[in-house]
Image (cartoon, grey):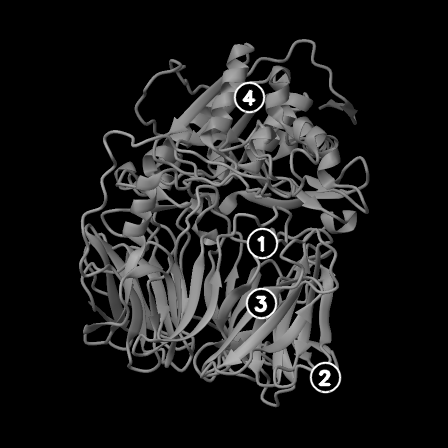
């Protein structure tokens, strides 16, 4: 859109009429104004999966926003999760709706025939790359399907009998051996009915035991919930052959997961058992890990972990005993796991935090200690017998380290590969590149001589964000840059097509061209022949092609440099058209280092199009958007970031407003603040503690920190350890200071930790009782984010209506005096 059409639209938008709606009323869903309504229903770009051998590219149709009817399907909320009792899958699942396939480098895309309204989940490539397994959710259950990629034909291997309530129900065996799956019991009975008359009170007690827990949701509450949990988690492990034959391997149990070893001869089998908990979710329930043979017989008990209600809330605290239990990717059948050496309590001083152990089949030897960490173990990337990279990190110091170890000789001194602040994007050398190992599992991709690995980096730097590919020589620690994005485009390596890295697949985009996959040849970049387009996706929302997108930087009063992404409507010119009504959409973050907090980690060359309830839809209504203005909360040395949260938050917002006013994009009397989740919390605080904004929009937030007494967001101290900080950070406490209009929106079924809907209900009641201007919109059947077409459309309608009345067309504030910035009040 050009300026001429913009100037015609803006006056029209100013005359839109939004009728006030009654309070405390049930209303019908509202649709946002055009062109937003049509944009919500536009076709979305497909998701793409490349086969591990890089031969096939599979495109998955992303569905449009689901109807509220789908989100209204039955739900059983138990043990911290939500289950659809009719399908034995997750409630309100996200799924793809269609599949198309092409060979890499070919233009022909073949659609795969599937049932109408297919709901596709749990995608998993076979190790020989010939097949893609997935589940298809029917009205009465979850089926296992397999796609033959060569034939582009899919067929069901089972009926709707899979147990998909927790995780992926199936894992491939090698070759043509089929899959190991979790299946609903053969002798399935009706779910237990809730008693009509209570049998007695529900009692919780504690006798001096320290068992803190954050504010988990959907926990077990009574004996009936326990019975429901046992009913829906009951499953059998079965072998499903490629002809659809189902062979039971175990009796019925509360199966958490089952994973075949890389050679397919053993199964790592985990089951949940009593006692259950009413205080923590199932991830902390007692769990038994066993190794089974292919006949389903137990050959080794790896661990029987007790109920873990007593894990300290401090970050980096873990449960005791063997954890992170898995198979080595580079061996046929070797287990590995970590064990805490500090009692799992991160606040206890310790020379070493964790030890990593391995144990090969047939699991008769003593486990071998492989490595000890001084920080908390974060994972391992396997290479081969003499090479692995292990990672450790520590939240308090923001420190991360990577070490090169020799698994064949644990006595070999580990070599430090990387050490940095994990928030320091400029110093990030990139993630090690992996590829299919000897058994098809991901292992380090080595150069042909075996001396070097590759690193795929994000490329943040003071000059901009330009992803890269490096070769890193293990012996000399020398790095060679092989490829880096450049120009007014954003690209990142997706795959290396050969161990010598002479050919790559990159995903490339620009502000006007959507992400597409390209094959490039390194060392020959002088002509057009070095790049071949593998996909040609087009822009589904071409209106945004002429939106002005810019990464901007500006200083905070204490010298910390801040940044944000500024979006302006097509054709807009500040000098000619004057300031626009503006919305800041914010989300703070805690840091330990001011220089790291000042880094720019976003690119202005990415392809950005709104979806869901994105505030970028407001560009069509003539607003400027300052997206993601950094609001770092910094605590250096012994200082905790949140002890000066309010001061730093207001200073960051003041700097953003100063920048916008100084540039002429906004005027100080027509700026709003908004955010989702922790951003909603931010919004309420800024309205309470500053006069920078005319109105606010707070979605799915938490406003009273005494309701999250064992920590929240980046705060790991408890309420009783930092009560003054908790109170000072709670906008509920200063609700009488919120004088500007505040729109509160919350999903009625929000199950996110800490953001119960009661948080919004209580702030609304406080502001109403104090005479504030406030509106509370509760969205039935919606969670922490909003998914249904009806709810998303209504949220956008509410946001447009609120900003039209309280920002764009608001009268000047009488008696308002702001700080002066080059002649502009803010």
Q: Is residue 378 left or right of residue 30?
A: right
Residue displayed at 43% across by 34% down: 203
The disc at residue 475 is 2
For the residues labelled 2 and 3, the Cα–Cα distance comes to 27 Å
Secondary structure of the residue carrying tag 4 is: helix
Residue 677 picture location, percent across and down: 53, 36
The residue tagged 1 is 605
Residue 693 picture location, percent across and down: 63, 23
* Mark found first going from the N terminus, 4 or 3: 3
The residue tagged 3 is 338
Q: Quadrant of the C terminus?
A: top right
For the residues labelled 4 and 1, the Cα–Cα distance comes to 30 Å
Asked which quadrant contains residue 824, the reply is top right
The disc at residue 807 is 4
Residue 142 picture location, percent across and down: 24, 57
Label pair 2/3, CB-CB below 8 angstroms: no
Residue displayed at 73% across by 40% down: 641
Asked which quadrant contains residue 479, the reply is bottom right
Mark 4: few/some/many CA within 10 Å (<14, 14-19, 20+): many
The answer to whether residue 598 is visible is no
In depth, the one of 773 and 783 nearer the eye is 783
* Mark found first going from the N terminus, 3 or 1: 3
């Amino acid at each position: 859109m050009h300026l001429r059409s913009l100037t015609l639209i803006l006056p029209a938008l100013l005359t839109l009429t939004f009728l006030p709606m009654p309070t405390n009323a049930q209303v019908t869903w509202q649709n946002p104004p055009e062109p937003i309504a049509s944009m919500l229903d536009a076709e979305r770009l497909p998701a793409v999966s490349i086969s591990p051998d890089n031969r096939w590219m599979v495109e998955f149709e992303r569905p449009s926003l689901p109807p509220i009817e789908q989100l209204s399907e039955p739900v059983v909320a138990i043990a911290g999760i939500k289950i659809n009792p009719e399908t034995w899958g997750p409630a309100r699942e996200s799924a793809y709706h269609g599949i198309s396939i092409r060979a890499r480098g070919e233009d022909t895309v073949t659609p795969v025939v599937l049932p109408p309204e297919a709901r596709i989940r749990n995608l998993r490539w076979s190790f020989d790359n010939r097949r893609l397994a997935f589940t298809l959710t029917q009205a009465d259950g979850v089926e296992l399907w397999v796609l033959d990629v060569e034939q582009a034909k899919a067929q069901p291997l089972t009926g709707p009998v899979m147990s998909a309530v927790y995780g992926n129900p199936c894992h491939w065996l090698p070759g043509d051996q089929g899959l190991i799956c979790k299946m609903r019991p053969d002798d399935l009975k009706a779910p237990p009915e809730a008693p009509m008359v209570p049998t007695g009170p529900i009692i919780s007690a504690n006798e001096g035991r320290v068992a803190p827990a954050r504010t988990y949701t959907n926990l077990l509450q009574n004996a009936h919930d326990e019975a429901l949990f046992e009913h829906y988690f009951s499953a059998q492990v079965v072998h499903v052959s490629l002809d659809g034959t189902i062979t039971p391997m175990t009796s019925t149990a509360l199966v958490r997961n089952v994973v075949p070893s890389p050679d397919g001869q053993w199964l790592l089998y985990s089951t949940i058992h009593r006692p259950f908990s009413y205080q923590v979710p199932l991830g902390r329930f007692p769990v038994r890990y066993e190794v089974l043979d292919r006949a389903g017989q137990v050959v080794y008990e790896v661990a029987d972990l007790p109920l873990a209600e007593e894990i300290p809330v401090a970050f980096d605290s873990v449960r005791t005993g063997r954890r992170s239990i898995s198979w080595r990717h580079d061996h046929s059948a070797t287990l590995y796991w970590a064990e805490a050496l500090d009692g799992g309590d991160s606040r206890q001083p310790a020379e070493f935090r964790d030890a990593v152990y391995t144990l090969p089949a047939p699991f008769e030897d003593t486990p071998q200690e492989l490595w000890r960490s001084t920080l908390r173990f974060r994972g391992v990337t396997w290479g081969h017998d003499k090479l692995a990279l292990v990672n450790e990190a520590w939240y308090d110091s923001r420190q991360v380290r990577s070490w090169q170890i020799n698994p064949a000789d644990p006595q070999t001194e580990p070599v430090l590969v990387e050490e940095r602040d994990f928030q320091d994007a400029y110093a990030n050398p990139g993630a090690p590149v992996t590829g299919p190992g000897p058994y098809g599992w991901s292992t380090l991709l080595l150069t042909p001589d075996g001396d070097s690995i590759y690193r795929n980096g994000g490329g943040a730097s003071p000059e901009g964000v330009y992803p890269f590919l490096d070769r890193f020589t293990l012996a000399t620690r020398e790095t060679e840059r092989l490829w880096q994005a450049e120009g007014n485009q954003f690209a990142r390596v997706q795959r290396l097509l050969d161990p010598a890295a002479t050919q790559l697949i990159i995903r490339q985009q620009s502000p006007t061209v959507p992400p597409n996959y390209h094959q490039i040849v390194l060392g020959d970049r002088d002509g057009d022949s070095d790049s071949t387009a593998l996909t040609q996706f087009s822009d589904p929302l071409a209106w945004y092609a002429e939106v002005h997108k810019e990464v901007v930087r500006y200083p905070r009063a204490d010298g910390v440099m801040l940044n944000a992404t500024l979006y302006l409507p097509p054709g807009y010119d500040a000098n000619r058209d004057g300031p626009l009504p503006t919305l800041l959409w914010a989300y703070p973050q805690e840091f330990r280092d001011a220089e790291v907090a000042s880094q720019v980690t976003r690119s202005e060359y990415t392809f950005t199009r709104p979806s869901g309830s994105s505030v970028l839809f407001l560009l069509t209504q003539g607003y400027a958007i300052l997206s993601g203005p950094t609001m770092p909360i910094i605590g250096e040395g012994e200082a905790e970031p949140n002890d000066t949260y309010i001061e730093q938050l207001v200073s960051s917002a003041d700097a953003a407003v100063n920048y916008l006013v100084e540039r002429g994009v906004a005027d100080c009397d027509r700026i709003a603040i908004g955010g989702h989740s922790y951003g909603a919390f931010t919004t309420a605080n800024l309205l309470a503690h500053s006069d920078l904004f005319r109105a606010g929009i707070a979605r799915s937030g938490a406003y009273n920190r005494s309701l999250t007494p064992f920590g929240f967001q980046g705060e790991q101290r408890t309420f009783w350890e930092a009560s003054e900080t908790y109170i000072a950070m709670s906008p509920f406490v200063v609700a009488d200071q919120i004088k500007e209009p505040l729109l509160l929106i919350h999903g009625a079924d929000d199950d996110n930790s800490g953001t119960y809907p009661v948080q919004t209900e209580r702030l609304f009641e406080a502001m109403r009782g104090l005479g504030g201007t406030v509106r509370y919109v509760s969205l039935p059947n919606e969670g922490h984010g909003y998914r249904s077409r009806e709810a998303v459309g209504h949220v956008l309608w509410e946001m447009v209506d609120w900003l039209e009345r309280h920002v764009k067309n608001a009268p000047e504030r009488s008696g308002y005096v702001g700080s002066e910035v080059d002649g502009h009040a803010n």
